Amino acid sequence: MKKNTLLVFFVLTLNLTNAQEVLPLWDTIPNAINDPTFIEQTTLDENSEPLRVSQISIPTLTAFLVPKEKASGAAVLICPGGGYRILAITKEGYNIAQWLNSLGISAFVLKNRLPDDRIMENKTIGPLQDAQEGLRTIRRNAVKWNIDPEKIGVIGFSAGGHLAASLSTHYNQKVYMPTDTSSARPDFSILIYPVISMQQEITHMGSRDNLLGKNPSQDQIDWYSNEKQVNKNTPPAFLVHSFDDNAVPIENSWEYAEQLKANNVPVEMHAYRSGGHGYGLGVDDTHLGWSAACAQWLDQMGMVKETTVNVITELNSTPELCQGAYWTPEEAKEKMKRFAQLWTNQKEWEERTQQIKKQLVEGMQLSKIPSFTKAQNIMISAPLVQNGYQVQNITLETFPGFYVTGNLYTPTKKQSKMPTILSPHGHGDEGRFSADVQTRCAMLAKMGAIVFSYDMVGYGESTTLNHKMPISLLLQTWNSKSIVDYLVQRDDVDSKRIGITGASGGGTQSFILAALDDRISVSVPVVQVSAHFFGGCACESGMPIHKQGNFQTNNVEIAASFAPKPQLIISDGADWTSNTPEVEFPYLSKVYSLYSKEDLIKNVHLKNEKHDYGVSKRIAAYDFLAKHLNLKKDKVQKKGEYNETDILILPTEKLKVYSSIERPKNELIGDESILTYLSIQK
């Protein structure tokens, strides 16, 4: 399951959970009707924390004051939303206060009266009265609270955004008699998915009905349509809205921003493709970044403590591991829909692809691998000649002191330039020595390919380290890349025809290398591309390649980043690929359609089979690889059917590199020595 860590980081890491003081807003509440039966209601969440508040007759300010040594001098009045019916007091109130505190900004959560004829003589002005007095209270006590009286803003969400915008445009309206000359004008406003207008075409009708009643006059509608009240003295604004907000149309923010621009008032608006409505600090996907963007805007406005912006930006980009069944299948379906909303054309998808690849590179710290200053050390045995193919044992130094071990399968009848295929294996006990790996490598070699089968780290002869060491994902990816480096230097390899295929953990290695190495021309990941399952081992998901701060991807998108090159996804009915025809493959097809290459992405789904690289899966791979690498199927077929019976399964000892030669003298031994050499901390 996804963890929403943003608020946790703000509160715990920065240790800015400040003392809170609840302040009465009024000595005598204006515009009030006393009704003893009108009792405040608080709904609690599962942790007995306040979720929402309603039937408020006594408004308050809850002060979250920043200690003087950490304070920027700025302050913000917070107006939670709730359709002028309730207040989402924690999500759009207290949580926001803690976030602002993390920026060095003192915050005041307004628990304002909600319009109700039972407790107000004129319900339309009650919330604005409380907002004006809230702002004046902060300014009135600025010296006592270490606040600069010219750095006091307002933030509002949804209907609270309407109240904040009303305060920004009606701060001079005398809706009550102030006790002093303190100004109610905010110095800036932050409006998050706000209700701005009361015009029927774009308003939120629930908020309008609650504030103005069912049959308001046109004058009332216009007066509370804040886009119509903007002038050159309206404070600068930061707006956030999502295109898919079905509660409050994005036109509310557009109209307000347009009027601010027309009046030469500074405005910044962030319009996100997805997010819907009511996400508070942010819950997922594109709109999660608004708080970081807002922090930067506040910094530019001079409202943020000098030492905090970099800290907050860093927290907002904290890497996060996505491991195993990180989402449920149902959650993954929704995520795929969200991902599909992030792009609409080839250009936008390729921008998304660059983000995906950047996260892969940075998440697995590929830059930590040093370059060779001399030729790689390669040791290769004499061939074991078989029927139509031969096998050589090989060890290849991939960076100084680190080796990948494997087997090289080649046709006995060689061509001048042959295609080549990488064959990483999964987590089965026998690894590259297993019958299914030997069989497919031999069959592909007989068809005319040079096939390199190699050990996962910690498997086979890669015994100098543990498989589940912290950077096994990095090491395996680098080994794969280094094998390509070796293969393309061979005189008998056609560097334009390079494929990769593996199952399970080998499938992960396949689609990751295909995403990162442009030299791969065909990819066949088997029983591993899943929307909800991110890989259960450190070698697949033990480094933060899927999520960092606001950015989130999954293995389907990593596989899709190989588009428009030929790719076959093989799935089955007994594991995390069981939904491939309905979930994963449609997304992949949509990506390929951007290039008009739908014919190059295929799915073979074997619903009655299990998690393996069995014969029916191998046959599908043979067909696909033969088509796209120009292999000769007739070399391994009898009467049009693949024949694997004449493949001799060799004993393990014959396939071991170090059964006949000594291990390299310079080999790095142990997890710690490798981590130390690469200067990577656990």
Image (cartoon, rainbow, N blue to C red):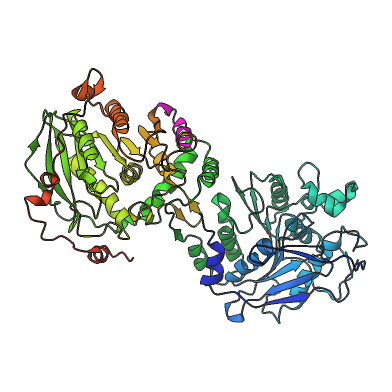
Task: Please count the marks in the image.
Answer: 0
In depth, the one of 230 and 111 nearer the eye is: 111
Q: Quadrant of residue 408?
A: top left
Residue 390 in picture, x, y percent from top left:
11, 35
For residue 380, what is the image quadrant? Answer: top left
Does residue 242 appear in the picture of this structure?
A: yes
Query: Which residue is depicted at the point 64% across and 47% down?
Result: 276
Q: Is residue 330 above or below residue 419?
A: below
Residue 501 x/y as whole percent: 29, 38
- Residue drawn at x 38%, y 52% is 536
Question: From the viewer's perspective, is 170 left or right of 106?
Answer: right
Q: Is residue 592 magenta?
A: yes
| Foreground of the two, 3 or 574 | 574
Q: Position of residue 225 (x, y in %)?
A: 80, 51
Residue 518 shown left or right of residue 294 in the figure: left
Kindly indicate the quadrant of the structure image that contains residue 105.
Answer: bottom right
Asked if residue 106 is positioned above or below residue 330 in the image, the reply reads below
The residue stretch that appears in magenta: 587-599
Residue 674 is situated, as x and y percent measured from the top left of the image, at: 24, 62
Q: Closest to the observer: 577 or 289?
A: 577
For this orientation, the residue located farthest to the top is 639
Q: Is residue 141 magenta?
A: no
Residue under the point 10% across and 44% down: 654
Residue 103 visible in rendering: no
Q: Main secondary structure of the magenta part?
A: helix
Please indicate whether residue 400 sits to the left or right of residue 268 in the image. left
